[in-house]
């Protein structure tokens, strides 16, 4: 521990005070006159001289106090001359000693200042190398972040005809809104949205975890006073468990993030998928309009490796950004825009690559395979096999999705002959281990046999007879579920739910069957048990909090009859009506149209039934429906 004198302490306090004053002065008015600046400069110079004089006086006083403390020895005769000369020598030595002590004090002070500016030790070189390599893997392709662009590329411009186009330039506030929309990369502004004058959400630089010693440029979301009041209102409305209260709040706060997320969830539960996606896209737009200019630049190669964009998920105010992007990833993936979903997955993972709070590593391989970026899967798997295990997330190389997806990626290139779409800068990052697809699949089956059982169940394959029956009766597969932990079972369930569409094809199932048969013929039960037990254990809490439903494309809806009986029906429609808007994609049918055509059109999910104005209209509609049914019966008899 470094000892500090009173003078050092005062100098340290003075240094910190001046540093704070300089920071405060940077926020003041810069239009000061030259005369004022000169006066302040002379004043500072005078203060410095006075301070130096005070320090010299203090040093002299300290030396005098030390001399008084030393015992005085008086001797007689000739020794008096020696004593006089010794005192002079001691005085010279004392002068040199005081200079050395002052120099040591300065060095100690510099050391303390340096330690205060570097609160955390630098990470190891191997850890830095691993993080930089992962940053290169997760670099974003900004044009691929827009789902509309991919839909137009896949299905043509007609695929966007039913979607609201971006707003046209209008004077006043609408023109300002359009200027903001031009800077967005993920979602374009829709013309039926309210004007975004000020959302109350912004983004700024922040200290990283541990006092700023973490690597990367950290950002955080910030909210103004009006937004904080809206958040308090949202929490109060959510506590009532009444969807209508949420819809009313959305009318007052059309760009409040949590309200938009909640309305998106309510709409999805009611089967209003287009309304659900509209609310979610509006939330994405609010966040993207608030992005710091350097936020996306640090994720797309616009900055050096030391300035990669990061965000701390543990900060509660930042979590809404992670959840909105996660929901958007699943939304565009459900639409078939897999490359956009992959870029969003890379974006979320790049914000917190060593923690992965939302489990992106459990689904990023799926979107890469669907995008035919097979080399990306292989390089990412190889990365997690080669980096040092200095963090629990580096154990993901042994996760079932990486083992099975790596085998499927190799098989797609080697056997199926599918062209790889991975960019060259990713393919050349790491030398991938040269193994055949069959070898990789057999290794995956040896480590995780229960995956095969769940895949067959999910694909509705008949397993009680034929070749599958003999395979599943082998002890390696028959006892597969006995020793799995609940944590690993949850991860396996997520993989099967997410990736079943890739494995339920006839060719993939036949490939699974051939390699499962080869595996049990080549190794006995004991060898397979040793192989399974040798896999690397996962940390106890890894991905325990994740839910299978969050990785599923299946949409769970509440029947409309239940909504009408239990209340809540029409909440989405009323929410749009109170905002002076029509729900996107909702087509009201004409009650006076042809009865048979009206009956057929009412069966389509995006058409809403006509609403009767009074009881007479309701009776007329019932008569028309009965007439349509009679016509249908006559046609069947003919």
Image (spheres, grey):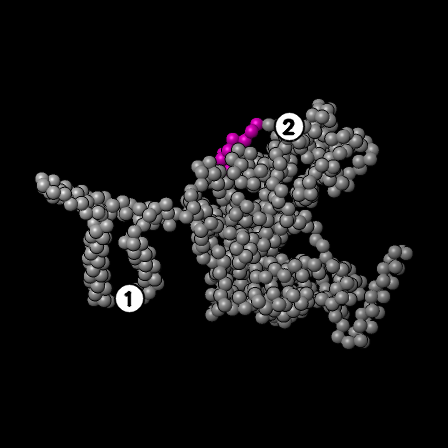
Q: Position of residue 571 (x, y in %)?
A: 68, 67
Residue depicted at x 44% and y 55%: 205
Residue density around tag 1, few if under 14, some if 14–19, many if 20 or more, within 10 Å? few
Of mark 1 and mark 2, the one earlier in the sequence is 1
Give the residue at x 52% y 45%. 353
Q: Residue 428: say if magenta.
A: yes
Q: CA distance from mark 1 to mark 2?
A: 73 Å
Q: Is residue 96 visible?
A: yes
Q: Main secondary structure of the magenta part?
A: loop
Q: Is residue 163 magenta?
A: no
Judged left or right of residue 37, residue 450 is right
The quarter in which the N terminus is drawn is: top left
In the figure, is residue 189 to the left or right of 336? left
Label disc, if present, on residue 439 of the rendered structure: 2
Looking at the image, which is closer to me, 602 or 107? 107
Query: Where is 337 relative to 484, above or below?
Result: below
In the rendering, at what x and y percent does residue 255 appear? 56, 64
Location of mark 1 (residue)? 31
Disc 2 crowd, CA 10 A, few/some/many (<14, 14-19, 20+)? few
Q: Position of residue 599 (x, y in %)?
A: 79, 62
Residue 628 lies, with reference to residue 437, above or below; the image says: below
Q: Residue at x 61, y 32 (%)?
A: 410
Q: How many marks?
A: 2
């Amino acid at each position: 521990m470094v000892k500090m004198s009173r003078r050092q302490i005062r100098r340290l306090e003075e240094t910190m005070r001046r540093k704070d004053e300089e920071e405060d002065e940077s926020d003041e008015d810069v239009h000061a006159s030259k005369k004022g600046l000169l006066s302040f400069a002379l004043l500072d110079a005078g203060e410095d001289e006075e301070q130096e004089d005070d320090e010299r006086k203090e040093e002299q006083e300290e030396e005098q106090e030390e001399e008084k403390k030393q015992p005085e020895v008086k001797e007689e005769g000739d020794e008096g001359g020696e004593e006089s000369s010794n005192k002079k020598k001691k005085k010279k030595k004392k002068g040199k000693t005081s200079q050395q002590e002052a120099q040591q004090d300065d060095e100690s002070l510099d050391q303390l200042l340096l330690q205060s500016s570097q609160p955390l030790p630098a990470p190891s070189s191997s850890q830095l190398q691993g993080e930089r390599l992962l940053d290169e893997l997760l670099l974003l392709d900004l044009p691929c972040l827009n789902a509309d662009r991919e839909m137009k590329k896949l299905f043509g411009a007609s695929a966007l005809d039913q979607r609201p186009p971006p707003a046209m330039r209008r004077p006043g506030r609408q023109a300002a809104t359009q200027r903001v929309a031009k800077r967005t990369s993920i979602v374009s502004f829709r013309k039926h949205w309210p004007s975004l004058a000020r959302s109350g959400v912004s983004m700024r630089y922040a200290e990283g975890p541990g006092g700023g010693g973490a690597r990367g440029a950290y950002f955080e979301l910030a909210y103004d006073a009006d937004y904080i009041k809206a958040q308090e209102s949202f929490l109060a409305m959510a506590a009532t468990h009444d969807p209508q209260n949420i819809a009313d709040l959305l009318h007052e706060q059309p760009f409040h993030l949590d309200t938009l997320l909640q309305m998106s969830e309510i709409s999805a539960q009611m089967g209003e998928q287009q309304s659900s996606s509209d609310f979610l896209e509006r939330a994405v737009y609010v966040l993207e309009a608030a992005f710091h200019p350097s936020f996306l630049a640090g994720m797309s190669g616009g900055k050096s490796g030391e300035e990669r964009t990061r965000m701390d998920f543990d900060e509660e105010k930042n979590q809404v950004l992670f959840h909105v992007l996660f929901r958007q990833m699943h939304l565009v993936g459900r639409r078939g825009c897999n490359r956009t979903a992959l870029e969003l997955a890379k974006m979320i993972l790049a914000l917190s690559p060593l923690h992965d709070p939302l489990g992106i590593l459990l689904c990023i391989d799926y979107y890469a395979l669907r995008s035919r970026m097979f080399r990306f899967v292989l390089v990412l798997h190889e990365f997690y096999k080669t980096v040092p295990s200095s963090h629990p997330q580096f154990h993901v190389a042994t996760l079932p999705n990486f083992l099975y997806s790596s085998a499927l990626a190799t098989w797609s290139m080697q056997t199926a002959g599918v062209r790889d779409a991975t960019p060259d800068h990713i393919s050349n990052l790491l030398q991938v281990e040269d193994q055949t697809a069959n070898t990789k699949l057999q290794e995956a089956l040896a480590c995780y046999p229960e995956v095969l059982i769940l895949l067959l169940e999910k694909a509705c394959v008949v397993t009680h007879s034929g070749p599958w029956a003999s395979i599943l009766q082998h002890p390696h597969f028959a006892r597969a579920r006995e020793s799995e932990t609940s944590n690993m079972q949850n991860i396996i369930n997520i993989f099967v739910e997410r990736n079943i569409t890739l494995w339920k094809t006839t060719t993939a199932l036949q490939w699974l069957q051939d390699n499962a048969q080869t595996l049990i013929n080549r190794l006995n039960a004991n060898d397979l048990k040793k192989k399974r037990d040798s896999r690397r254990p996962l940390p106890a809490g890894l991905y325990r909090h994740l839910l299978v439903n969050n990785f599923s494309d299946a949409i769970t809806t509440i029947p409309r009859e239940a909504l009408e009986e239990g209340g809540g029906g029409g909440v989405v429609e009323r929410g749009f009506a109170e905002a002076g808007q029509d729900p996107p994609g909702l087509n009201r049918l004409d009650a006076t149209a042809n009865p048979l055509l009206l009956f057929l059109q009412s069966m389509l999910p995006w058409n809403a039934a006509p609403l009767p104005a009074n009881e007479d209209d309701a009776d007329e509609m019932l008569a028309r429906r009965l007439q349509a049914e009679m016509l249908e019966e006559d046609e069947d008899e003919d």
